[in-house]
């Protein structure tokens, strides 16, 4: 990456950012409190039970977006501060649709494209991973017979490894009731994985285009086609495919000027690191009901 020193001058934060952020704090607090069985409507003060989930999730999402913002500024690319998107807890379980920054000027160099695209997933992964470890240590082991009708979360490779490390004596008849911090960490890894899909202008699309150039379209099409068989494992993949069609409209990444300039060895390592993170976080069936 570039050795030039970066001095971040945070601009005045527009009112819309504050409003969206405060609303997202409220909706994630409410979601976390409901998960903990709080009776928020009869006793509003019980919303504080949602603090562990809300703080952890927003810290992961905020770190992800700040990674993008930092490297955008480093490469003198004009970008906004993060927009956090609140969601009604009764419509969307976790109380948020995530966060994003808006790139307002073109990215001309593919090393900048790769670094800006990769910085978010790497930063978010670096926070979500320890959050998941801490949350698993705080989680409760229960018998599977006691969780009829519960939401079952799918396992990624990293989830299986961490579960084995934190709960080595777990039997086949047992499962883990995730602590809110662990659930936020799990969501953080899921978001990281989804963003690393090599499609369009997702983070993974930026990275794949910087690494593969015009061949990205082949990988993008293949990744999108694979969402169809994955939809038979979990309806979530079908929903995400529809959202990608609406939001991206194309699996192809827009062209940049210096696509034929070779990447440095260090930049290639960053791209390979993102591929490893994607594989570690990949979940074939993210959600199902027991």
Image: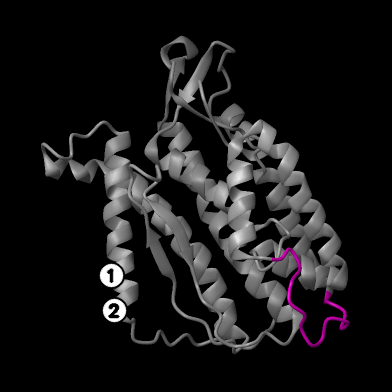
Q: Is residue 253 magenta?
A: yes
Image quadrant assignment for residue 213: bottom right
Question: At 58% across and 81% down in the image, what residue appears?
Answer: 72
Give, as a single range, the part of the protein colored magenta: 250-264
Image quadrant assignment for residue 251: bottom right
State left or right for residue 51 relative to residue 225: left
Q: Is residue 133 magenta?
A: no
- Mark 2 and 1 residues: CB-CB less than 8 Å, in contact? yes
Report, in whole angstroms, how far the alpha carbon at label 2 lies from the one at label 1: 6 Å
Helix, strand or loop at mark 2: helix
Question: At 63% across and 31% down in the image, what residue appears?
Answer: 160
- Label drawn at residue 15: 2
- Label drawn at residue 236: none
Helix, strand or loop at mark 1: helix
Up/down of 81 relative to 215, above or below: below
Q: Position of residue 16 (x, y in %)?
A: 32, 75
Residue 284: in sight, yes or no?
no
Q: Position of residue 224 (x, y in %)?
A: 74, 52
Residue on which the image places disc 1? 19
| Colour scheme | one colour
**The N terminus appears in which quarter of the rendering?**
bottom right
């Amino acid at each position: 990456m570039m050795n030039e020193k970066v001095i971040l001058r945070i601009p005045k934060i527009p009112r819309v950012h504050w409003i969206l952020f405060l609303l997202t704090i409220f909706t994630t607090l409410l979601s976390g409190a409901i998960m903990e069985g709080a009776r928020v409507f009869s006793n509003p003060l019980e919303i504080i039970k949602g603090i562990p989930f809300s703080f952890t999730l927003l810290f992961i999402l905020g770190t992800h977006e700040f990674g993008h913002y930092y490297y955008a500024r480093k490469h003198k690319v004009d970008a906004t501060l993060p927009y956090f998107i609140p969601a009604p807890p009764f419509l969307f379980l976790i109380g948020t649709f995530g966060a994003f920054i808006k790139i307002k000027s073109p990215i001309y160099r593919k090393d900048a494209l790769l670094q800006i695209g990769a910085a978010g997933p790497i930063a978010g992964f670096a926070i979500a991973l320890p959050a998941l470890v801490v949350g698993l240590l705080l989680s409760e082991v229960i018998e599977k017979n006691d969780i009829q009708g519960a939401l079952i979360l799918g396992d990624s490779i990293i989830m299986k490894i961490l579960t084995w490390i934190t709960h080595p004596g777990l039997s086949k008849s047992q499962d883990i009731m995730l602590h809110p911090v662990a659930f936020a960490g799990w969501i953080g890894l899921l978001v990281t994985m989804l963003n690393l899909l090599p499609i369009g202008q997702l983070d993974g699309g930026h990275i794949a285009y910087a690494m593969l150039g015009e061949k990205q379209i082949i990988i993008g099409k293949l990744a999108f086609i694979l969402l169809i068989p994955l939809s038979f494992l979990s309806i979530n993949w079908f929903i995400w495919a529809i959202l990608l069609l609406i939001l991206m409209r194309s699996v192809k990444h827009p062209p940049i000027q210096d696509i034929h300039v070779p990447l440095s060895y260090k930049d290639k390592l960053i791209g390979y690191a993102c591929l490893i993170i994607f594989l570690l976080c990949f979940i074939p069936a993210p959600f199902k009901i027991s």
